[in-house]
Amino acid sequence: MATSDIHDHGAHVAAAAESRWAMVVGAIILFLLAMTAYMSLHWAAMPPVRTETIDPSTLHIAGEFVEGNLGTALEPDGAVTVRVVANQYSFTPQCVVVPTDTPVTIRATAADVVHGFSIASTNVNMMLVPGYISNFRTRFSEPGEHLMPCHEYCGTGHASMWAHVQIIDKGEFMRRAATARRLSCVK
């Protein structure tokens, strides 16, 4: 074989290898695009099963989030449920009492615009979207008082939107819960 034939043969082999790799990369890109399109359409048509919806215009009239149901409640199994509603520019209730060393479920929603809150020095961080119920499960180990500010800009009064969380000893909480259906530290 002449030198030019060897060079032409080598160039042909290299070009064929590059073409194969280009097809493999193209196939991967097409697969990822198809997967993204499928998942986008699937989630748009089928929201997650765990999503709870609620009509924000009737929160105050009936159901789980009427004012008499807000605050902290002791459940029959010994767990605690806290219900909170965010509304420009306040949380209801303004002060929440929870026990130490007890499973706590926070159920919250927004009545008007997107809100959010975190409880300082804890792992609690929630987004509240009108029309949806947000859930967060936690357990508090140390007693104390914490601030619960809104962390999503919700309008001109956003800076003053916050509440308090009192974490108290489990025994003290049980004594208070024995005499009240809902607990709150609002005085």
Image (tube, grey):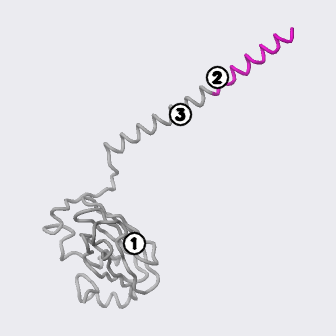
Query: In terms of image quadrants, where is residue 111?
Result: bottom left
Residue 19 - label: 2
Q: CA distance from mark 1 to mark 3?
A: 40 Å
Structural distance between the alpha carbons of marks 3 and 2: 15 Å
Q: Is residue 175 above or below residue 81?
A: below
- Badge 3: residue crowd in 10 Å (few <14, some 14–19, many ≥20): few
In this rendering, position of residue 21 left or right of residue 135: right
Q: Position of residue 43 (x, y in %)?
A: 36, 45
Q: Which mark is residue 29?
A: 3
Magenta: main secondary structure equals helix
Q: Residue at x 46, y 37 (%)?
A: 35
Badge 1 amino acid: Ser
Residue sitting at x 26%, y 65% = 110
Name the N-terminal-most of marks 1 and 3: 3
Q: Quadrant of the C terminus?
A: bottom left
Relative to 22, residue 110 above or below: below
For label 3, the SS is helix
- Residue type at numbered disc 2: Ser
Tell me residue 25's x, y (percent). 59, 31
Mark 1 lies on residue: 118
Please tell me which residue lies in front, 130 or 149. 149
Q: Residues within 10 Å of mark 2 (few under 14, many from 20)?
A: few
CA distance separating discs 1 and 2: 54 Å
In the image, which residues are magenta? 1-21
Q: Classify residue 112 as left or right of residue 40.
A: left
Residue 9 is one of the magenta-drawn residues = yes
